[in-house]
Image (spheres, coloured by chain):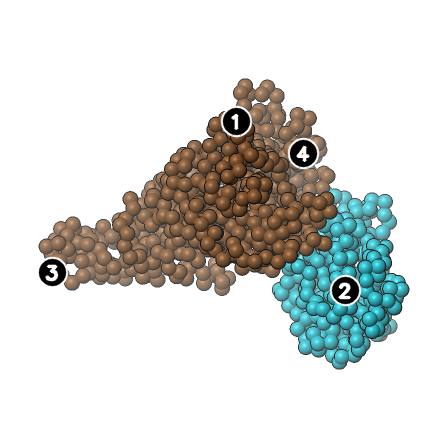
């Protein structure tokens, strides 16, 4: 599949992104921007309780209010059987998804949707919500993952029996699943070690923090056809979920993705979309629904909070002889935390011969977790990379050298199963060693930490279409909402294959009816998988262009080559005819066989695993516990950076989110299980003043399975920061922080306790 | 975003007109920059007002005037303008620092001096959406009968968080107030009651028209604050210090703190600390004063104890640095 190496015209350059101007001028249309004639406003009534039985819901008064056109509850949704399907990097169970969208029998968390209304104005919809009478029987609740695992814990689901243990337990519990990955004799491994580090760690659930709240407009006509406009990472997933949840035929639904104001995995599922369709179906009018920020925090995302135990042993020379981890992840109200990928990633960067990882998926009275950038991996890495740092100190080995000694390379049998092909982990470590940052001097109360991270990256199903216009410009249609600059990278690949200027390629994101099925934007897959589809569709266009030129010249298509955007006669005919440009051929397309249109559909295999290593410098104010990030460098193997600026942007963005996770982000629940800080003022994502310029260093070890060597890059950079910050704090003041977030009061308390 | 309730917007161009409209509309609210008020209105905090009276079109309220000895600032002056004003930067650096440290640039472009001085007190149990407060039976500050911070309390502990008040308190700030009886002036400290619910001592129709500050030769003043995030954040604690040296002795000391109590605290009994050098023994007596006068109630997500302790750290650092004449930067 790999094309021969030749001079590239666009790959690796930095043209201005096609969606840039609309975004900086405010012209871009986001989820809440569409308004249709006769449109109603939909709103959701949410549970004020963390755990309660719904004894009754009386909607009579709400329905009687003038201007209220529909009120729906779970009784309006079909009951579905338990069925798991892949959704991005996680799995979705439709029965649970339905119960999450509108609660049946019980509410499982503060903010759980109970009913929805559609009214002629937002004020009326709000009034209507207040008129819905819900009679709750409040039940004991459980928020903490370790507490939820205890036999006496309040039980969320009485039909949940732990999977993955034999025999299957006879009593239900909050432990939905146990997973295990192991190799070798653990006891013998630890016996060989000269030093063993064993620690418990905790991480807090954190929200994806996208700026744009969930928003949708749905319009259903009398013949049952629905149109949906929404902010999503996957219009085809939304279409499928709506079809399943409302028992509709897929072809009856057309979903158009709006411009998206951030997703980070959190917009790979649905909350409002099926409700908007349902309300629109009942009223015969378009319905718009937009979440408030408080609703986003109470009822969407986040990723799991977790309790981890990690134990790693090594000999004096730094060779790890055994490693063990137990991961307990909160799933939220329904099973499905990212503990399985977390367990697979825990030791993935290393060539450990003996290890065991056990993971538990645990339900608690919090919102159901959603995917968040490298789901599961950052949590496991916080423990493993912190323990490795401590081990290095114990052995008096440079933490970088310890990682080099044990690093996975091409041919290493990965802890999660396969053998690695060409990977760039060692190259990231080498780049760190050679970077001036790694040797820069530090002042008092300042410290440096490093940490590494891994993510699989995925491929999957994609379609692409290239239409050549009459003037020789080209329109590319992709099926992936653009959340990271993928329009630029896809258009660059098309321009590269066609040999034309980037400016002559326009790219749009198609709706579910204008382009073939394309799996969602997630798993760092778009530039890899959809990129491959675009390359193939462009090659399809080139083939047609050669045929058209051959027809004009009346020679065989095999005797035409395509170079620099022109058809040239080759072989025996070389030099016989003037070259024909794309513009020339496009102008005559009608006479040579009709419009030129290239297509590709594929299921991309062989996504290149991604590795990164970060360097973080901090300064600690020992009297207030405040941590200042002084300098930060993120190094990552990108395979091949198609548009280096957007690869750098991914590295910076992932690091920024990781720093927030490390230092300040947390949900505060009161004793009744009610979220106290559902807003950006008190849920503290970092702002620009909290971060230094994050330097991004791109290492390129090409992925042989992509025509230009691309690996996914979007997720790896959120994996290392938590441990990098913790390791830097330890290095600065000798205090080992094992619990996130490392906020000023917590760090001050740890300093008071002597670490 | 929550829906903004309907209201009439009134835009007086003189203080007399503003007062007249205020008297005509008992259920009105005063609009400065709206950076806090509008958020609260959207959340249904306080009764939905019939009218908002916008004080930004009154010329005399938008002026900064004075010299190196005295300063008068109109209540409608924007915080960004105050922070950037050459006179303020040159002679009242602590005030400029306080103004420059409020929230973030976007808020400072809108927010006003009067709005910051009269900023509503804040609490976990108050600055929440309608559904949240409803499901928690509201609270003593608005709509309920119980203080969730101190369940037996008859007073509200919601915390004052304005940054300008402490900086002006240590400069002997006075406010000019417009009311039924015309204009009156009062020491800034008297603007505040000591109850988090009715936190201002103003009559129903009264409003602040301007505020003054005084500088004296040899007086050194500075403001520092600590916050979890370095922008778009209320202070966990903010401290203003003004001091003068008398040779190698502390000649005068005034200290004010925001972010801990329902009012900005002008520390009492600081005169007793003057007359000697600034050493550890003095700083320990200083700590004791702060500890006795600053509250440590759980009104924010950061514990009261931490905020009081952080305030003490900042106060000590400011006193030391001002006494030594060192550079005044914000604590990182």
- State left or right for residue A136 relative to residue A706: right
Asked if residue A225 shows in the view, the reply is no
Q: Is residue A461 above or below residue B310?
A: above
CA gap, disc 4 and disc 1? 39 Å
x, y (%) of residue A368? Answer: 58, 38
* Element assignment for label 3: loop
Q: Mark 3 lies on which chain?
A: A
Observer-side mark, 4 or 2, equals 2
Q: Mark 4 or mark 3, which has the lower sequence index?
A: 4
* Element assignment for label 4: loop
Task: Identify residue for label 3.
Answer: A576
| Residue A188: assigned label | 1
Q: Please give the name of the residue rendered at 87% of the width and 62% of the height, measured from the top-left corner.
A: B268
x, y (%) of residue A173? Answer: 62, 26
Q: Mark 1 or mark 3, which has the lower sequence index?
A: 1
| Residue A142: assigned label | 4
Q: Please give the name of the residue rendered at 42% of the width and 51% of the height, measured from the top-left corner.
A: A699
Asked if residue B270 shows in the view, the reply is yes
| Callouts 2 and 3 in the same chain | no
- State left or right for residue A690 relative to residue B53: left
**Residue situated in front as seen by the camera: A235 or A650:** A650
| Residue A64: assigned label | none
| Residue B320: assigned label | 2
Q: Mark 1, residues whose alpha carbon is within 10 Å: few (<14), some, or many (≥20)?
A: few
- The mark tally for this picture is 4
Q: Mark 4 lies on which chain?
A: A
Observer-side mark, 2 or 1, equals 1
Q: Mark 4, residues whose alpha carbon is within 10 Å: few (<14), some, or many (≥20)?
A: many
Give me the chain that's cyan.
B
């Amino acid at each position: 599949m790999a094309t021969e190496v030749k001079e590239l015209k666009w790959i690796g350059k930095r043209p201005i992104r096609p969606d840039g101007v609309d975004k900086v001028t405010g012209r871009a249309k986001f989820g809440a921007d569409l308004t249709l004639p006769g449109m109603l406003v939909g709103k959701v009534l949410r549970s004020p309780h963390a755990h309660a039985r719904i004894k009754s819901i009386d909607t009579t008064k709400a329905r009687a209010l003038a201007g209220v056109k529909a009120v729906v509850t779970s009784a309006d949704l079909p009951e579905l059987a338990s069925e798991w399907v892949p959704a991005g990097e996680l799995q979705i169970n439709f029965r649970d998804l339905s119960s999450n969208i509108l609660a049946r029998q019980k509410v499982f968390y503060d903010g759980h949707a109970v009913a929805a209304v559609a009214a002629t104005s937002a004020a009326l919809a709000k009034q209507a919500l207040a008129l819905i009478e819900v009679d709750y029987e409040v039940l004991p609740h459980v928020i903490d993952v370790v507490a939820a695992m205890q036999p006496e814990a309040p039980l969320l689901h009485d039909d949940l029996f732990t999977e993955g243990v034999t025999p299957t337990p006879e009593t239900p519990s909050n432990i939905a699943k146990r997973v295990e990955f192991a190799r070798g004799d653990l006891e013998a491994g630890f016996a060989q070690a000269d030093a063993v580090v064993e620690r418990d760690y905790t991480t807090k659930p954190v929200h994806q923090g996208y700026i744009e709240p969930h928003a949708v407009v749905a319009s259903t006509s009398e013949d049952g056809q629905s149109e949906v406009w929404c902010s999503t990472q996957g219009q085809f997933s939304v279409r499928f979920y709506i079809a399943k949840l409302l028992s509709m035929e897929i072809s009856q639904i057309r979903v158009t993705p709006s411009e998206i104001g951030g997703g980070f995995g959190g917009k790979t599922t649905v909350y409002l979309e099926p409700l908007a369709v349902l309300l629109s179906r009942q009223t015969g009018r378009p319905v718009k629904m937009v979440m408030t920020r408080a609703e986003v925090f109470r009822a969407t995302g986040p990723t799991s909070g977790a309790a981890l135990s990690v134990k790693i042993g090594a000999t004096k020379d730094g060779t790890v002889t055994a490693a063990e981890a137990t991961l307990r992840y909160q799933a939220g109200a329904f099973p499905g935390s990212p503990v399985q990928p977390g367990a697979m990633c825990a030791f993935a960067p290393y060539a450990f011969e003996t290890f065991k990882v056990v993971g538990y998926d645990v339900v608690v009275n919090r919102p159901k977790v959603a995917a968040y950038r490298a789901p599961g991996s950052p949590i496991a890495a916080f423990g493993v990379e912190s323990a490795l740092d401590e081990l290095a100190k114990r052995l008096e080995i440079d933490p970088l050298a310890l990682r080099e000694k044990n690093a996975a390379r091409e041919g290493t049998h990965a802890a999660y199963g396969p053998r690695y092909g060409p990977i760039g982990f060692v190259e990231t470590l080498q780049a760190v060693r050679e970077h001036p940052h790694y040797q820069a001097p530090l002042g008092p109360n300042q410290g440096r930490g490093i940490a590494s991270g891994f993510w699989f990256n995925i491929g999957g199903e994609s379609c692409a279409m290239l239409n050549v216009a009459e003037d020789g410009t080209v329109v590319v249609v992709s099926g992936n909402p653009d959340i990271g600059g993928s329009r630029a990278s896809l258009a660059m690949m098309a321009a590269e294959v066609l040999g034309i200027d980037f400016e002559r390629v326009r790219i749009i994101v198609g709706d579910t009816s204008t382009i073939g099925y394309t799996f969602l934007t997630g798993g760092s897959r778009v530039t890899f998988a959809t990129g491959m589809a675009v390359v193939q569709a462009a090659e399809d266009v080139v083939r047609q262009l050669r045929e058209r030129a051959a027809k004009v010249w009346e020679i065989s298509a095999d005797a035409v080559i395509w170079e620099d955007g022109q058809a040239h006669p080759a072989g025996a005919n070389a030099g016989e005819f003037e070259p024909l440009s794309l513009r020339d051929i496009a102008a005559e397309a009608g006479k040579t066989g009709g419009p030129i249109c290239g297509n590709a559909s594929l299921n991309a295999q062989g996504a290149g695993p991604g590795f990164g290593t970060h360097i973080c410098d901090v300064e600690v104010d020992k009297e207030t516990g405040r941590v200042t990030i002084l300098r930060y460098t993120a190094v990552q193997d990108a395979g091949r950076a198609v548009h280096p600026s957007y690869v750098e942007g991914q590295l910076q963005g992932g690091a920024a989110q990781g720093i927030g996770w490390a230092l300040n982000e947390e949900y505060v629940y009161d004793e009744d299980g009610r979220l106290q800080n559902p807003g950006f003022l008190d849920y503290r994502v970092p702002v620009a003043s909290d971060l230094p310029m994050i330097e991004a260093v791109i290492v390129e070890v090409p992925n042989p399975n992509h025509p230009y060597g691309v690996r996914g890059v979007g997720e790896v950079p959120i994996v290392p920061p938590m441990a990098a910050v913790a390791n830097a704090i330890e290095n600065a003041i000798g205090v080992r922080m094992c619990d996130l977030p490392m906020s000023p009061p917590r760090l001050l308390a740890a300093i008071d306790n002597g670490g | 975003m929550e829906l903004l309730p309907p209201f009439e917007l009134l835009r007086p161009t003189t203080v007399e007109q503003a007062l007249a409209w205020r008297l005509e509309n008992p259920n009105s609210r005063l609009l400065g920059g709206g950076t806090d008020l509008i958020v609260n209105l959207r959340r249904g905090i306080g009764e939905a007002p019939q009218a908002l009276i916008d004080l930004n079109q009154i010329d005399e309220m938008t002026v900064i005037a004075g010299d190196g000895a005295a300063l008068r600032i109109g209540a409608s002056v924007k915080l960004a303008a105050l922070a950037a004003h050459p006179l303020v930067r040159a002679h009242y650096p602590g005030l400029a620092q306080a103004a420059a440290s409020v929230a973030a640039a976007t808020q400072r472009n809108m927010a006003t001096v009067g709005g910051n001085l009269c900023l509503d007190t804040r609490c976990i149990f108050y600055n929440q959406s309608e559904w949240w407060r409803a499901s928690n039976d509201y609270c003593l500050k608005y709509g309920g009968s119980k203080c969730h911070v101190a369940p037996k309390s008859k007073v509200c502990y919601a915390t004052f968080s304005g940054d300008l008040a402490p900086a002006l308190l240590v400069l002997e700030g006075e406010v000019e107030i417009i009311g039924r009886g015309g204009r009156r002036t009062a020491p800034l400290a008297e603007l505040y009651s000591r109850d988090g619910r009715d936190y201002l001592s103003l009559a129903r129709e009264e409003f602040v028209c301007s505020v003054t500050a005084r500088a004296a030769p040899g007086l050194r003043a500075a403001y520092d604050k600590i916050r979890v995030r370095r922008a778009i954040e209320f202070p966990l604690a903010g401290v203003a210090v003004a001091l003068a040296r008398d040779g190698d002795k502390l000649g005068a000391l005034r200290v004010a703190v925001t972010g801990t109590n329902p009012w900005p605290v002008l520390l009492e009994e600081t005169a007793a600390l003057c007359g000697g050098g600034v050493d550890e023994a003095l700083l320990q007596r200083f700590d004791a004063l702060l500890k006795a006068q600053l509250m440590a109630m759980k009104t924010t997500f950061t514990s009261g104890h931490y905020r009081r302790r952080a305030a003490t750290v900042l106060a000590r650092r400011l006193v030391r640095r001002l006494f030594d004449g060192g550079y005044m930067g914000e604590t990182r």
